[in-house]
Image (cartoon, rainbow, N blue to C red):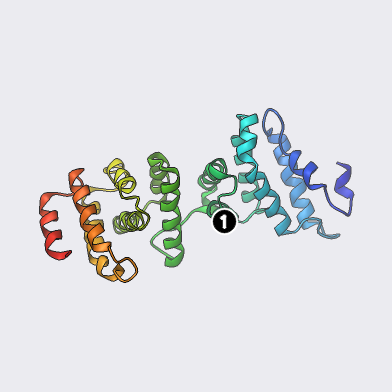
Amino acid sequence: AGWLACEEGPPSQAFWAACLDAEGLLAEKRGLVLKMLAHLSTATEGLLLDEADVQIGFSRLLGSAGQKAKDNANITDSLVSLLVGAVEKELLPAEFLRSSRRMRFGGAKGLEIVRKVQRLTPMHSRRIWGSGDKRHFREEERETILEYFDSRSIEELAQIVEELHLSEEEQAHFVRTLLVIAMEQQHEAVALAAVEGLLGKCWSSAEVQTAFEQLRDVAKDLVLDFPYVREKTTDLVKAAASRGLLDESFILLDGTTVV
């Protein structure tokens, strides 16, 4: 601990490596690390670490999560605990977690860790959907959908959607956005698998139908940027009906409105 009094600050390699051991983080060590971080970033005699230093250190730690997980099966829980403590003690802003998700620090393992931290720090990380900053809501919505197309894990998508506590209106909008992005990126089958797999769990048949009605209505607005959106919408409606997500009457109606 001699480097605590050193004006040059702690060696980065030694400091971040000290956060981990073969058995994972013990509660005592985690508390000590967080206490040292708080001291180094608020010391009245002069800051040894500023906010950027702390965030860079944690981003590097997340970046190494995948490799460390291969050597230590318990590392995920250790990193989650450390990050939760850092957020709760306001050493890290909740925005750091959102940025880490967007930048995908640490790949799939890093994403898994950040999601767990967000779930465990609701007062700091809760995302309020359908109220407040609508632009922020739309960004979060798109990021969640892109993450699903990347991982193709319906279970992960279900977990995130359930935590959001969406209203019926927002559930329908979420499904509609899922379908639009699917058509843009040619992931129609992947999107329909999620709609079908989470039917009755995250949304109802009525909300799915509302989503397709909205999709049909916005198709005309998307045609300039997405020339084949009408044809793709028609194909998507037929594919959804074949999965039992829409009834035949919707196909007939769709045929009269999407040409």
The vertical placement of 12 against 93, above or below, is: above
Quarter of the image holding residue 169? bottom left
Viewed as shown, does residue 180 lie left or right of 121? left
Residue 233, compared with residue 220, is above or below; it is above
Q: Residue at x 67, y 48 (%)?
A: 60
For the question of whether residue 133 can be seen, the reply is: no
The residue depicted at 14 percent of the width and 49 percent of the height is 247
Q: In the shown orientation, is residue 145 left or right of residue 11?
A: left
Q: How many marks?
A: 1
Q: Quadrant of residue 103?
A: bottom right
**Quarter of the rendering occupied by the N terminus:** top right
Residue 28 point in image, percent of width and height: 72, 35
Residues packed near mark 1 inside 10 Å, few (<14), some (14 to 19) or many (20 plus) = few
The picture places residue 19, in percent across and down from the top left corner, at 72, 39
Q: Is residue 41 visible?
A: yes
- Residue 228 is situated, as x and y percent measured from the top left of the image, at 27, 63
Please report the residue visible at 65 percent of the width from the left and 50 percent of the height from the top.
59
- Numbered disc 1: secondary structure: helix
Question: Mark 1 = which residue?
Answer: 99
Q: Nearer the viewer, residue 233 or 30?
A: 233
Residue 144 image point, x, y percent: 43, 52
Q: Is residue 151 above or below residue 73?
A: below
Query: Which residue type carries mark 1?
Result: Ser
Quadrant of the drawing holding the C terminus? bottom left
Query: Position of 248 compared to 40: left or right?
Result: left
